[in-house]
Amino acid sequence: MDLLDEQLVPDHAREIKAEARAFARDHIEPNAREYFQAGEYPEEILEAGRDAGLVAQDIPEEWGGRGFDLAQLLALTEEFYRADAGIALTLQLASFGCEITAEHGTDEQCETYLRPVAEGEQRSGLAVSEPDTGSDLAGMQTRAERDGDEYVINGEKYWVGNGVEADWITVYARTGDDEDNPYGNHSLFIVPTDTDGYDAEHIPEKMAMRASKQAHIEFDDCRIPAANLIGAEGAGFMLLADFFNHGRIAVAGHGLGLAAAAIEEAWEFTRDREEFGRTISDFQSVQHGLAEMLLEFESARTLTWRACEHVANRDRAGYWAAMAKTKATETAVDIAEQAMQFHGGRSILDERRIARVYRDARVPVIYEGANEIQRNLIYRQAP
C-alpha cells in the first residue's frame, strides 16, 4: 500500500519527499526496533541524516540550510514518522526552535547559532513547558531578570528535546508581570548549554518514542548576554504562538506517518492470519474496520495538506493548524488501537511494529499543545 502517495503534495515538495522516503527505508526502518528497545539516542542515524541533507534543512539557505518550506517539511515528516516516530523525532529536534531565530533574530544571532546547526556541527533545542505548567503559555514561571548587559535566568523547564545533547536552546521565560496584558509578559532567549547555572538531566525511561531524549532543566542564576534576546522583550508569547502554528502542521505529519504505519501493519496481518478456516480479512467486520481506517486516514491527510497551504499563507493559521493537528493525531490513536485489536494477543509483543506504533501514537496528541487546547482554539477562531 502507498498511503503516503504524492498526489496531495505540491510539485516543489515531491523531490524532498522522495529523498525522505529513500532515507527512511535505508536508515530508519531497519533500525527502528533496535533503538526502541534500547532507548538509545540514534547518533549514527542523525549523522546519516545530516550527510543526506535532510536534517536541520528548514534553516534558510543564507544561513547554510536548504530552506525547506512548510510543504517540504510536511512531506519529509510523514515519511520519517511512518518509518519510526522516535528516530524521526530525534532527527527533527536537531534544529528545534531555529525557525524562531531565523524569523526574528539578528543577522549576528543567525550567523552564530543557525549556521553551525545547518552545517551539522551543532544541534538546538526549545524549552517551553515546565514541571507544573504544560500548555498554558501565559502561565510559565521561569524568569529572566535584566541585570545591566545580561539577563539572569532562574527556574525549571521540562520535556525539553535535546536538553542534554543540544549546544544551545531557545528558552521561553517570564520578563514581566502585567496582569492587564498577560500575553506580553514573556520573552525568548538563546541560551548556550555550557553556560554556568544551566543543569540538564534526561527524563527517565518513557513508554514511547524511546529513541528521542527529553530533559529536565534547572536554571540557577544562569547569566546570558542581553544580546541573546530574540526580538523584543515581551514578544515571546506572540512569537511562540506563530512558531507553533507551523509546528502543529508538522505534528499533524507525525500523526499521518503513524497512522499509515498502523494501517500497513493491520492490512498485512489480517491477510496472513487465519481463524476458523479463513483469513481474518475475509470477515466482514474486519473489512469494515479496515475501511474505516482508510476513511479516517484520507480525511485527516486531506485536511492536513489543506491546512498546510493556509498556514504557509498565514491565512487564519491558528485555526487551520489546530484543526490539522487534532484530526491527524487522534486519527493515529484510533487507527493504532483498531490495528492492535486485529492483531489480537500478538499486538502486545514488544518486537511487533504495531506495539511501537500504538505507544508512539499516544504522544503527539499531547505535545505542541494538548488537543483539548486545540479545540479551544478551533472554537474561538471559527469562521
Image: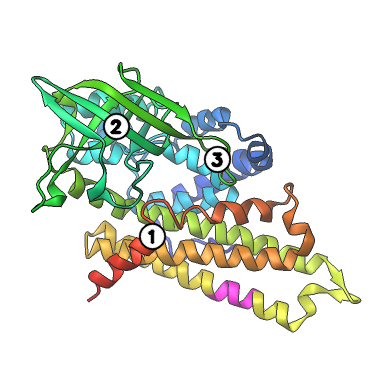
Q: Residues within 10 Å of mark 2 (few under 14, many from 20)?
A: some
Q: Which residue in the protein does label 3 denote?
A: 87
Q: Which residue in the protein does label 1 denote?
A: 10
- Whether residue 285 is situated above or below residue 221 in the rendered picture: below
Q: Are marks 1 and 2 in contact (CB under 8 Å)?
A: no
Q: What number is the disc on residue 59? A: none
Q: Quadrant of the C terminus?
A: bottom left
User: Disc count in the image?
Assistant: 3
Q: Residues within 10 Å of mark 1 (few under 14, many from 20)?
A: few
For the residue labelled by badge 1, is the local secondary structure a helix, a strand or a loop?
loop
Query: Could you tell me the amino acid type at mark 3?
Result: Ile
Q: Which residue in the protein does label 2 denote?
A: 155
At which x and y percent is residue 10? 38, 60
- Is residue 258 shown in magenta? no
At which x and y percent is residue 199? 38, 23
Q: Residue at x 52, y 73 (%)?
A: 296
Residue at the extreme right of the image, as rendered: 277
